Image: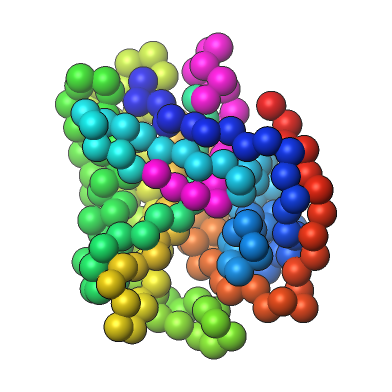
């Protein structure tokens, strides 16, 4: 299985903020500068960095959340799905969003030494997100992934979503990514994936509170 390499957090001081999606849970950047929301069955782990190292090429996400803990037997790092942010060099959010979704799909759903999955973009559109106290432009894609050789642990199909925020005059584009296997009835739907991605937002200081959190193993 192409399981992510995970660096687990220690007990930490964490900033908490209100959810933007009713009934969901916020995943908050360490200083509280930004947040996004995940469904109730997901587990926010904002202090965790996770990702993949495929043939020496690393792909990592920060401000993480996960769904489907221990999805493959005794492997404590195997999750059915997850989410997090990365920054990609470039200026064109429309190009970056597709390339980054495809990159995650290849890292997450290629068996060790196996064949890369088939990736088909099934939804693509421009959206607005609340960044810096104003509405900002972003590009969103959803991609369906068909795993060529699922083996014991990979799903047969998966859904990958990406939202790239346009940064005027910037040299890199922040991208929120989310992914989930689609084999079971409890898989994250396309509608919920869109809600997750478009909940990305800046958080004003007056909405931030600080607490100490001990993450569960």
Q: Position of residue 123 (x, y in %)?
A: 32, 61
Q: In this view, which residue lies farthest toward the bottom?
A: 134
| Residue in the picture at 30% in, 39% down | 58
61 lies left or right of 207? left
Number of numbered markers:
0
Picture quadrant where residue 179 is located: top left
Front residue of this view, candidates 23 and 63:
63
Q: Position of residue 22 (x, y in %)?
A: 72, 64
- Whether residue 148 can be seen here: yes
Q: Position of residue 171 (x, y in %)?
A: 28, 72
Q: In this view, which residue lies farthest toward the left?
A: 115
Front residue of this view, candidates 77 and 156:
77
Front residue of this view, candidates 155 and 1:
1
Quadrant location, the C terminus? top right
124 lies left or right of 190? left
| Residue in the picture at 63% in, 37% down | 9
Compared with 174, 82 (above or below) is above
94 lies left or right of 159? left
Quadrant location, the N terminus? top left
Q: Position of residue 50 (x, y in %)?
A: 47, 39
Compared with 115, 67 (above or below) is below
Asked if residue 197 is among those painted magenta in the image, a careful observer would answer no
Compared with 16, 165 (above or below) is below
| Residue in the picture at 73% in, 38% down | 11
Which contiguous range is marked in magenta?
60-77
Compared with 73, 31 (above or below) is below
34 lies left or right of 10? left
């Amino acid at each position: 299985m192409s399981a992510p390499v995970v660096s687990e957090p220690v007990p930490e001081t964490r900033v908490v903020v209100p959810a933007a999606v009713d009934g969901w849970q916020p995943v908050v950047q360490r200083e509280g500068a930004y947040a996004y929301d995940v469904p109730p069955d997901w587990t926010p782990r904002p202090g965790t960095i996770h990702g993949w190292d495929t043939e020496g090429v690393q792909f990592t996400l920060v401000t993480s959340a996960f769904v489907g803990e221990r999805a493959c037997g005794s492997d404590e790092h195997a999750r059915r799905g997850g989410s997090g942010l990365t920054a990609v060099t470039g200026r064109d959010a429309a190009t970056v969003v597709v390339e980054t979704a495809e990159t995650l799909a290849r890292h997450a759903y290629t068996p060790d030494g196996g064949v890369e999955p088939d990736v088909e973009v099934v939804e693509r559109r421009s959206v607005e997100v609340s960044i810096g106290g104003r509405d900002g432009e972003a590009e969103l894609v959803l991609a369906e992934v068909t795993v060529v050789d699922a083996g014991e642990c990979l799903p047969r199909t998966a859904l990958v979503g990406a939202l790239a925020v346009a940064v005027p005059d910037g040299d890199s584009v922040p991208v929120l990514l989310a992914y989930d296997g689609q084999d079971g009835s409890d898989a994250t739907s396309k509608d919920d994936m869109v809600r997750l991605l478009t909940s990305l937002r800046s958080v004003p200081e007056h909405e931030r509170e600080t607490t100490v959190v001990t993450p569960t193993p």
